[in-house]
Image (spheres, helix red, strand yellow):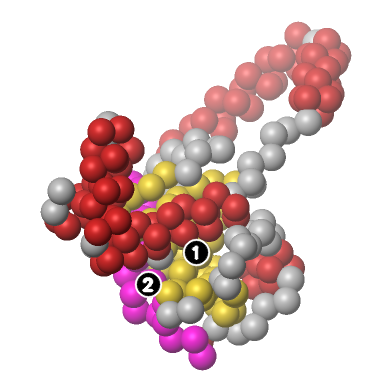
Amino acid sequence: MDCATFSSWLENRDSYDLSEADRAMKHAIVCAECKDLLHNDEELERFVTRMFQYEMMDERLVGKIDRSLDSAGLKRGFRGGIAAAFAVVAVAVLFFVFIPGRGNFSSMDEFGQYVVQEHREHGKITPLFEKIGDIGQWGQDNLHHSLDVNTLPAGNIKIVGGRICTIKNCEFAHLLYQDGKQFYSLFAVSGDEIGFDLEPGRIYSLTVSNVKLHVWIKQKMVYALTG
């Protein structure tokens, strides 16, 4: 395996079989440059995995919601049902007539392009980032959303700071992390700004202009980590 094939495998290794992975690992042993690429990629994977923790809803809470809905349905009479039907129709009409298409980003590719561009333009200008004590509180104060990104991986990775930036008319939190000479940008934005679907509990990976990007949704906030 040569370096170009190794780089292709690294970007798309989920789609390769185990025999190709074995060849790639053997190549990394003898090629220092590809070994570093593999190390950085694995560090990025560990970084996002440790940071990402999806919390399931308490089953007791789900039961309470179901019982509340059933109780409300029993109390509502015929007239209430007719009124509710008219209300639903009115809301539907208003939605389709006055509400624009959801989200400012129509696809993950478009979202990734904007995020990576912001990372490249400002992801190493450390004076732009203010020091942060409590990340959750900082997000609430500056973005009006609590950020659930308190977990940091083991090692020398540290948070440089945070800033609020505007990407395609949307306010993003931009957190900067550093591990030696390597900088990681973590962006967070309200899920209401996203016009494509993300499955809770799943981490999406893509490469944009040779930059590895991980995207996920948690507690109605969308996160994008670049490395």
From this view, report whether residue 171 is shown above or below residue 215. Answer: below
Q: Which residue is mark 1?
A: 187
Q: Residue at x 29, y 40 (%)?
A: 21
Q: Nearer the viewer, residue 205 or 15?
A: 15
Residue 122 location, quadrant = bottom left
Label 1 close to label 2 by CB (< 8 Å): yes
Q: Residues within 10 Å of mark 2 (few under 14, many from 20)?
A: some
The x and y percentages for residue 18 are 30, 33
Q: Residues within 10 Å of mark 1 (few under 14, many from 20)?
A: many
The x and y percentages for residue 200 are 55, 38
Q: Amino acid at mark 1?
A: Phe
Residue 13 numbered mark, or none: none
Q: Whole-Å distance between the Cαs marked 1 and 2?
A: 10 Å
Q: Nearer the viewer, residue 94 or 29?
A: 29
Residue 125 location, quadrant = bottom left
- Considering the image in quadrants, where does the C terminus appear? bottom left
Q: Nearer the viewer, residue 72 or 11?
A: 11
Q: Which label's residue is closer to the chain start, 1 or 2?
A: 2
From this view, report whether residue 80 is shown above or below residue 115. Answer: above
The x and y percentages for residue 79 are 75, 13
Q: Residue at x 57, y 80 (%)?
A: 160
Residue 118 numbered mark, or none: 2
The x and y percentages for residue 86 are 61, 22
Residue 147 visible within the image: no
Q: Amino acid at mark 2?
A: Glu
Query: Is residue 76 rendered to the left or right of residue 204?
Result: right
Query: Is residue 203 inside the magenta stretch?
Result: no
- The magenta span reads 103-127
Query: Is residue 106 rendered to the left or right of residue 143?
Result: left
Query: Is residue 28 rendered to the left or right of residue 97?
Result: left
* Secondary structure at numbered mark 1: strand
